[in-house]
Image: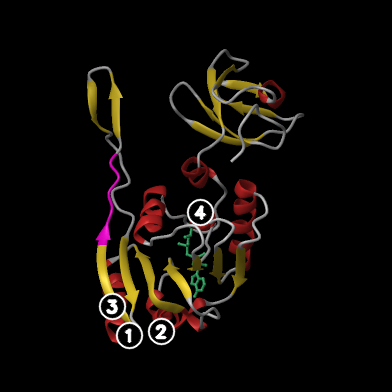
Amino acid sequence: MRSGPFEAGDKVLLIDPKGRKYLLTLRPQHQFSSHLGTIPHSDMIGREEGSVLRSSRGAAFAAFRPTFAEYALKMKRGAQVLYPKDIATVLIWGDIFPGTTVVEGGGGSGALTIALLQAVGEKGQVITYELREDFLRQARTNVEAFLGKVPHWMPKLKDIYEGIEETSVDRVILDVPEGWRAVRHAAQALRPGGLLLAFYPTVPQLQTMAAAIEDESLLVLQEVFETVHRPWRIQGLSVRPQLRMVAHTGFFMVARRMS
Ligand SMILES: C[S@@+](CC[C@H](N)C(=O)[O-])C[C@H]1O[C@@H](n2cnc3c(N)ncnc32)[C@H](O)[C@@H]1O
């Protein structure tokens, strides 16, 4: 993550007076435009993060570099991304730390991939299986726009249901619709003590996956849970949960590889 004054090529998040967020890439000849007016990118270049810029119609926009969560929700999508609250859960319940080798299936838009790459660091490795070439291309664009070139990422245009080529990996993370078709491969790819984490939006998927893990003698199911993120609003005396929230995303399953 860069710091210091904004430069051409930086990603910038503009926040308008109502809290609406706009993600842009600074290009000297371009201008940002919304219903609240325009701001030339050249006005932002050289300014510190947290600067307030006035649009042509006098509206105040605060300018920051996007956090990962802000970027993940704003970046261009191929497939549906994991929500930041679920990505946070994957990192801790999946026990991802610097130096870890992680196999991920599927790559989708690359939101989880970015977080995994940051967490494993340059001494770790993330191997991403993705079925669709267009999604893999989009994931690469999103990953590189946020992290630059990442030598510790190995994207593969491959069907994870057909096998996992790696062995002795620390973690397998599945965000694919029929992860039970990869349970055997995950069990064989993981080192003893390694961890399989799977994410499913629906109960039938959860049940099918649980049955597949139960049938796999090398794995033991440890935890099934969901996480709820409930944002609040604080405005004068109006201190209460927001009226709208993302009520459901999915369930997590965590299994361990036996010896
Ligand atoms: C929900 S998306 C993953 C989103 C991703 N975790 C993110 O945060 O951006 C599911 C992805 O799995 C891919 N997929 C589905 N079946 C697959 C398979 N058998 N092997 C590899 N990828 C697969 C889909 O093409 C899709 O891109």
Give the crowd class for mark 2: few <14, some 14-19, many >=20 residues within 10 Å: many
The stretch drawn in magenta includes residue 47: no
Establish if 109 lies above or below 204.
above
Q: Quadrant of residue 259?
A: bottom left
The residue at which mark 1 appears reads as: 216
Tell me if label 4 and label 1 are in contact, CB under 8 Å: no
Amino acid at pointer 4: Ala
Instruction: Give the quarter of the image for residue 217.
Output: bottom left
Nearer the camera: disc 3 or disc 1 = 3
Is there a contact, CB below 8 Å, between mark 4 and mark 2? no
Label 1 environment density (alpha carbons within 10 Å; few <14, some 14–19, many ≥20): some
Residue 227 among those drawn in magenta: yes
Q: Earlier in the sequence, mark 2 or mark 3?
A: 2
Between the residue at mark 1 and the residue at mark 2, the CA separation in whole angstroms equals 7 Å
Disc number for residue 111? 4
**Left or right of 151 on screen, residue 66:** left
Q: Is mark 3 within 8 Å of ligand 1?
A: no
Cβ–Cβ under 8 Å for marks 1 and 2: yes
Return the residue at label 3: 220
Name the residue carrying label 2. 184
> Which residues fall within the magenta stretch?
225-230
In the picture, measured across the screen, residue 164 lies left or right of residue 44, that is left
Q: Residue at x 58, y 62 (%)?
A: 135
Q: Is mark 4 within 8 Å of ligand 1?
A: yes
Q: Position of residue 146 (x, y in %)?
A: 60, 47
Looking at the image, tell me whether mark 1 or mark 2 is earlier in sequence order: 2
Residue appearing at x 60%, y 53% in the figure: 143
Viewer-nearest of labels 4 and 3?
A: 3
Amino acid found under the numbered disc labelled 1: Glu
